């Protein structure tokens, strides 16, 4: 069933869009890792399975989609973990840890929901907390061109969209300190989001446009050859 679903996903994406994927070399060659990505549209989750030819991935999905019969069925095949975005979800956290212990890799969107403005919105500290608990390398991944209004607008015009998926170098977060935890979580969250922003065109920077850490990351990037 999974092979059929993957073939269907590839067929649909190739039909509606040209997808350019780069940064495969940044994926750790061994061990677990966390993919942290921005969230622009409803097609973002299955895009991970289009870009990566592997089944050891699982995706955190907002709990509201668990009530949708199609998403609930799809989640059984694609390892969706439905999570309460607004309250501590110990059950989901235990499931995440169990899946990681079994050798799977987490795909997560720090923003927690689709951006309605088409650019980065503020990341939620829950992702940083989860990342520090897991202690695994984080691979920032930037999505562009997956906005709902863009995808569906082009479909109405019978045009293919252009989607880019760019992975950046993996990094790790230090352990969460005992004191000033909220401040540390905010700093860790900004680090994740700014690393994603640094892989995106300027129009997607959103609330992180003037963040000092983003400016540092951009300044450290090698200059493009003329």
Image: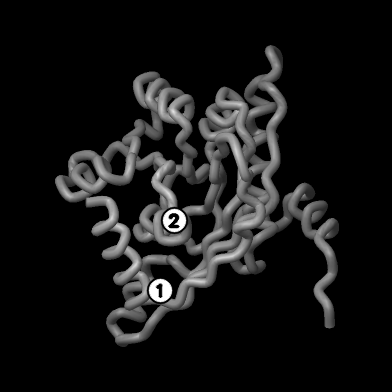
Tell me the element at label 2: loop
The answer to whether residue 88 shows anywhere in this view is no
Q: CA distance from mark 2 to mark 1?
A: 26 Å
- The part of the image, by quadrant, that contains residue 209 is bottom right
Residue at horizontal 74 percent and vertical 53 percent from the top = 214
Q: Residues within 10 Å of mark 1 (few under 14, many from 20)?
A: some
Residue at horizontal 47 percent and vertical 56 percent from the top = 52
Residue 217 image point, x, y percent? 78, 53
Q: Which residue is mark 1?
A: 150
Q: Are marks 2 and 1 in contact (CB under 8 Å)?
A: no
Residue 168 image point, x, y percent? 66, 54
Left or right side of 41 for 11: left
Residue 90 image point, x, y percent? 39, 19
Left or right side of 106 for 185: right
Whichever of callouts 2 and 1 sits on the residue coming sooner in the sequence is 2
Considering depth in this image, is 191 or 95 the residue closer to the camera?
A: 95
In the picture, the quarter occupied by the C terminus is: bottom right
Eyeballing the image, is 157 above or below 183? below
Q: Residues within 10 Å of mark 2 (few under 14, many from 20)?
A: few
Residue 180 image point, x, y percent? 70, 19
Eyeballing the image, is 193 above or below 220? above
Eyeballing the image, is 46 above or below 192? below
Residue at horizontal 28 percent and vertical 82 percent from the top = 156
Tell me the element at label 1: helix
The answer to whether residue 130 shows anywhere in this view is yes
Q: Check the image and name the residue furthest to the top.
A: 178
- The part of the image, by quadrant, that contains residue 57 is top left
Q: Check the image and name the residue furthest to the left.
A: 69
Residue at horizontal 37 percent and vertical 75 percent from the top = 14
Q: Which residue is mark 2?
A: 53
């Amino acid at each position: 069933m999974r092979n059929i679903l993957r073939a269907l996903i590839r067929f649909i994406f190739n039909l509606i869009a040209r997808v350019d994927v780069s940064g495969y070399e940044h994926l750790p060659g061994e061990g677990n890792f966390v993919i942290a990505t921005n969230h622009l549209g409803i097609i973002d989750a299955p895009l991970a399975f289009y870009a990566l030819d592997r089944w050891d991935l699982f995706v955190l999905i907002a709990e509201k989609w668990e009530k949708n019969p199609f998403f609930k069925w799809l989640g059984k095949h694609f390892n969706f973990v439905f999570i309460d975005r607004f309250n501590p979800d110990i059950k989901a956290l235990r499931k995440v840890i169990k899946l990681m212990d079994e050798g799977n890799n987490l795909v997560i969107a720090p923003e927690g929901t689709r951006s309605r403005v088409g650019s980065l919105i503020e990341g939620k500290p829950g992702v940083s907390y989860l990342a520090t608990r897991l202690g695994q390398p984080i691979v920032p991944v930037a999505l562009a061109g997956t906005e709902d209004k863009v995808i569906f607008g082009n479909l109405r015009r019978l045009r293919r969209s252009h989607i880019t998926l760019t992975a950046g170098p993996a990094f790790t977060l230090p352990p969460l300190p005992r004191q000033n935890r909220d401040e540390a979580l905010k700093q860790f969250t900004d680090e994740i989001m700014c690393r994603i922003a640094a892989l995106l065109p300027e129009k997607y920077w959103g609330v992180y446009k003037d963040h000092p850490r983003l400016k540092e990351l951009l300044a450290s990037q090698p200059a493009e050859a003329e």
